[in-house]
Image: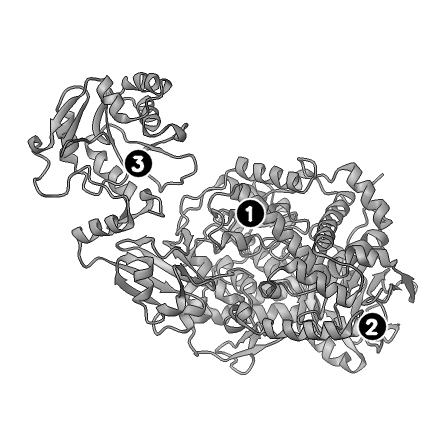
Amino acid sequence: MGRPKAWLPWFGKTMIEHVVDTLRPVVDEVIVVTSESLDLPSLDATIVRDTEPERGPLAGLRDGLLAATTARVFATSTDAPWLRAAFVEELFSREGACAPVADGHVQVLSAVYPAVGAALAADLLDVGRSRPLDLLEALDYQAIDAASLASVEAGASAPWDGFNTPGAYLDAVRAVDPAARCEVELLGRAALRADVPVVALPVGSLGDVLAALAAGADLVEGERVARRHLVSLGGRDLVRDLALPIGPGERISVLDAQAGG
Amino acid sequence: MHGCHGRYLRIDLSAGTAEHVAIDSAISRALLGGVGLGTWLLAREAPVGVSPLAPEAPLVFAFSPLVGTGITTSAKFAVVAKSPLTGLVCDALASSHFAIAGKRMGVDAIVVVGACAEPSEWVGGRLRRTTWWGRSAEETGQGLAGEGSVAAIGIAGEHLVRYATISADGRHAGRGGLGAVMGAKQLKALVVAGDRETPVADPEALARRAADLRARAAGPATAKYRELGTVGNLLAFDRLGALPTRNFQASHFEGAARLAPERWSGERTHRRATCAHCTIGCEQRYASTRDRDRPIRIEYESQFALGPLCGVDDPDAVIEASAACDVLGLDTISTGGTLAFAMECGERGELEGGPRFGEDLLPWLDAIARRRDLGDRLAEGSRRLAQEIGGDALARAPQVKGLEMPGYEPRSLQTMALGLAVGTRGADHNRSGAYEADFSDQVDRLRGDARSVAAAVASEDRAALLDSLVLCKFVRGVFDDLEDETAAILREVVGGSFDADEVRAIARRVVDLRKALNMREGWQPTDDGLPARFTDEPLASGPAKGVRLPGERLAEMIRSYNRARDWEDDGRVPTERLAALERELGLRLQAG
């Protein structure tokens, strides 16, 4: 992906804000398990740092369950653009551990776990088992046919559908708004050569977006932003990789490299 | 040794005498010139613990082996003394014909000690009463130009403002208050002239290299400075949440676009100029719309300090304030920093009758330079003002070691945060260009780590080298390999067998020497750090909203930095290293 999924723009929010805000009305608390090094936007959630990222997703799930103050926990990934509160409520209406099954795949990161499963997860990790599905199976979970869920619309994107590539993310964006746009602000020398300093353009990869600028060719060298420039994503990350996705409403700034005195 | 004269001129103002003092060639080879040689001379000449404004405090003007060669940007000199702001080592550079004329006197440096009995000028080898006292440095320079190249102080230096500058050719040795050191000596101007050429080791090779460097310095590597100058930083910094605003209470300024020259699009007179012996041509001059015929040199640091830092969004007001600082002889960064601090204190009810964010700065600049009314307290700088106010004011004074902070928000530029925290001169963007790493895709600028430490160390070493050669920082991007190429230049200028390893060793030696001298003069481990605001308060708004620089993280970076320098964890230069420096350089560096 090239960018932290949590920070990807999603129609006025970051992806992690979208997920937290979706969950917030239907749960008692939201716990975000994240890596030690990733800064997050300000969230109405408890932040838990993944203590053993090298042990895989089950270790992160264990840490989240340990932090929970409720008996049951709904677990989701960050990249859940289609997550709906009604879906979470419907899963919570079932008993015990449960997970939807779609096309033969158990959706382990769109499932409900009992908080006491933390101890079982720790035991599984100790014997070298690191998949969330191992925990669900150990909990004798209830597999729910996705087609039987009233909150899941047939033929539409499912609550557990995520994305693992820039293209998949941009497809999801365009599915919501085919005309989604981002903004490019030209600063420094790039601004001297432009008619207007801020331009709205269709979302796409950074390369696509820069290519759509009148002076775009001057800003690119091969697969990278030209050495004399640098691109800021929303005022935070500084990047040169043209493959990175630029999302809806996102403002990127083209800067002079060697910023500073 | 080629490239050097092997001696310095020691002027004793109290006695009215001047004498030549030999410099061993081993010292010149070990430290080159500029900051390296100047620090050595300060260490040699300064009585231990001397007050910066005492007559005995030396004021050093140091040239370098490259001065007078055709190497682009080499017409620079360093002024070195103890800073009235920090009480520690201070060096400030200026580009000027003064460097060339001074070296043509047949000396590698000029050391001024003592004090005049009345306001005086040193011209043609003798001291005389000056008629320029009370006039600007520019007027003084023009008035004395017929007698040589002039370094002079303005009104602020005469009034011992702790951040007064020394000016030459309209350029300023700006930071640390060295103009006050000169003012305390009642020395209005130092005028130099001479005709002594400095032989170089390999004139033909040097001429070829100089021509090549001149061409490269006029090329793409420096285009940013030539086309827009450092003022192009302002809007970029704003968009990155790195623009210090209203005394560092914010990192994003709503009026930034108004102050950005790339948005002025021909609405005001613009001229470009160059320093002596430079092919970069970075100097950008813009006129106020109220005085279209007088374009003023504007740099990012002046623009940020007199603009967003003080809540001023009127470009004319910033240009005029910058011009006033030049005329009065005030360092724009410390002036803006002290005013902005006073403005916040005023908002908090801690200072009555002081300046307010967004107001016209001109009356305040004059009051500071003449130490009139509240200007007298502001002339002491933000740290002393904070100490006077008491309470927790010091946590908000925008300074490190007493030197006001340049325009880099430490919380959103965490490699630079380390550079600011450990700088021997205080909060400094010229002795540490650690921001370069922050403005790249090489580190996480919002979360400093080991990569930040390595970048900060490397940046300081490069700066120590460039400042001792002396070459302009803006030429750094011209070199494919800075150490390799500067070693080649030194072989051609000085002779002998310089290589990249020796050049790196020189840089390290200069860094060690400056720290060792600071230790001798009273530096304490607790001096390294940032005001509590930066470690206690997250950024409240803008693109970097919520970003924190926890104190533990900064402390760990400082420890790692000290280890990377082979110093003690608390930043002390180890005793064995001090002893080695003393032997190698013939200095007394250990107090007691």
Q: Chain of mark 1?
A: B
Front one among A50 and A144 = A144
Q: Are marks 3 and 2 on the same chain?
A: no
Q: Residues within 10 Å of mark 1 (few under 14, many from 20)?
A: many
Please say whether residue B393 is visible from this viewpoint: no
User: Identity of the amino acid at label 1?
Assistant: Ala
Circle 3 is placed at which residue position? A44
Q: Residues within 10 Å of mark 3 (few under 14, many from 20)?
A: some
Q: Residues within 10 Å of mark 2 (few under 14, many from 20)?
A: some
Q: Tag 2: residue type?
A: Pro
Say if B451 sits above or below B281 in the image: above
How many marks overall?
3
Q: What amino acid is labelled 3 in the image?
A: Asp
Q: Could you tell me how far apart the alpha carbons at marks 3 and 2 are, in whole angstroms?
A: 71 Å
Chain containing the residue with disc 3? A
Q: Which residue is mark 1?
A: B417
User: Closer to the observer: label 2 or label 1?
Assistant: 2
User: Could you say where residue B542 lies in the image, as x and y percent from the top left?
Assistant: 39, 52
Dividing the image into 4 quarters, which one contains the N terminus of chain B?
bottom right
- In the rendered structure, the answer to whether residue B132 lies left or right of residue B268 reads right
Q: CA distance from mark 2 to mark 1?
A: 43 Å
Q: Nearer the viewer, residue A185 or B223?
A: B223
- The reply to whether residue B418 is in sight is yes
Q: Quadrant of residue A232?
A: bottom left
* Residue in the image at 19% along x and 59% along y: A179
The lab-note entry on whether marks 3 and 1 share a chain reads: no
Picture colour scheme: one colour
Answer above or below: position of B260 versus B530.
Answer: below
